[in-house]
Amino acid sequence: MARSRPTIAIVGAGMGGLAAAATLRQVGIEVQVYEQAHQFLRVGAGIQMLPNASRVLRGIGIEKGLRKIAFEPYSHLNRVWDTGEIKRELPMPESLYGAPFLCMHRADLHEALVSVLPPDIIHLNKKLVGLDQSDKGVTLSFADGTKAQADAVIGADGVHSLVRSLIVGPDAPLHKGRIAYRAVFDSSLMNGGQIAPSRTKWWGPDRHIVIYYTAADRSQLYFVTSVPESTEWMTQESWSTKGDVHELRAAYEGFHPEVRMVLEACPDCHKWAILEREPLPHWSIGRIALMGDACHPMTPYMAQGAATSIEDAAVLARCFAETNNDDIEGAFRLYEANRKPRTSRIQAISSANTWMSAGNDDTSWLYGYDAWTVPLVPADQLTMAN
């Protein structure tokens, strides 16, 4: 009799959850995805897929389509806030790390990931309220009164992960007194003005702003900031909170004319708190595991939040294949051993906000990483080498 394929329930249909659904299906695992939202909305934000992430997208089968609509920056450019002096520039041709650097609207990436999955495996309006684990599987309970059964559960439910709280208990976010403004808008609002054909980070004494196009035809551009603000406001971590463009412009008074041009053209913006969390002691318990922001949430300063969750997806699928899909707990341990050292390193550097600020730091360990081929270390050999 043929062995039945394991079934895995993924909680959360963000970038990581959808990528995991795609990669796990490639190795013969049945997947169901449960998302609490009623519908997918086109949230106004850009996203960077550096070579370490776009290489995974290639393996999933969506890189080619994304390249038709995404902007490919000339370089990873860092400039001084007022003079425009170049602090460091890293040209990013595809030949550098064997995969492209792509900038796009988050919704375009999300739609591409959805497109490779059967529609009937994604279930909307399914807010998780409980998990009941036994030696035979896991029962998921949802707010609408329904239940689902699976051999295992992966929590890809973001920084407010309920799955995480069930594994390690509730944890409070760290408030470090910083907020971010962001906006995507029509570049024609700059009245003929143009920004550099790079992804540019403008470094100020206590704040920065990152600006780039999000469409191949340069019709849309995006910026995201980090500015100090009192912790009194720091109760919000929502991407839908409206910001005040006048406050935003005032916060960047004196910045380079290119920055001022972008902010003057911006019609409105959103604002959210940049909150952090400590690395977790472990990522799984029995048949339940975490991925992405649920286990290694990051500041946005290295553009590696979604990227590392997409890396997680590729390595997770490889770990199941390595254990022949019949040792769920072993696959989860192997996955953590191979991912935690790398994500912890990225978390620390991103929190410090020092990446490529100066000097000639080696970038190959980050952008040259190939989640599909990096050698897997045994589950009992945690190492910082990867």
Image (cartoon, grey):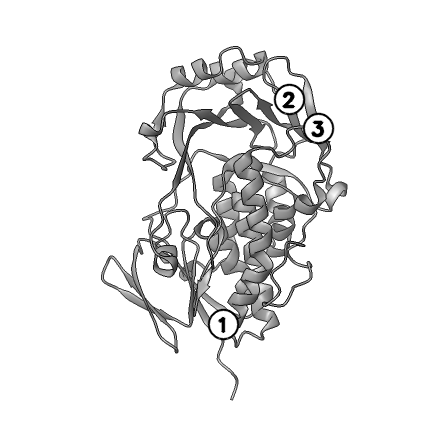
Instruction: Find residue 216 and report its image quarter.
Output: top right
Is residue 33 shown left or right of residue 21? left
Say if residue 304 shows up in the picture. no
Point out residue 40 in the picture as x, y percentages from the top left corner.
39, 45
Hey, what amino acid is under mark 1? Answer: Ile
Numbered disc 1: secondary structure: helix
What crowding class fits label 2: few (fewer than 14 Cα within 10 Å), some (14-19), or many (20 or more)?
A: many
When asked about the image quadrant of residue 80, the answer is: top right
Q: Which residue is mark 1?
A: 328
- Viewer can see residue 94: yes
Residue 89: assigned label:
3
Between disc 2 and disc 1, whose residue precedes? 2
Residue 381 at what x, y percent from top left? 62, 65
Q: Distance of mark 2 from mark 1, alpha carbons?
A: 47 Å
Asked which secondary structure carries label 3, the reply is strand
Task: Check residue 79 in the rendering and tell me which mark sits there, or answer none.
Answer: 2
Find the residue positioned furthest to the left: 145
Dot 2 or dot 3, earlier in sequence: 2
Answer few, some or many: residues within 10 Å of disc 3's Cα (few below 14, many 20 plus, some between 14 and 19): some
- Which is nearer the eye, 323 or 87? 87
Q: Relative to 345, does residue 323 appear above or below in the rendering?
A: below
Given the image, on which type of amino acid does mark 2 rest? Arg
Q: How far from the left and from the top, in percent, is residue 377?
A: 65, 64
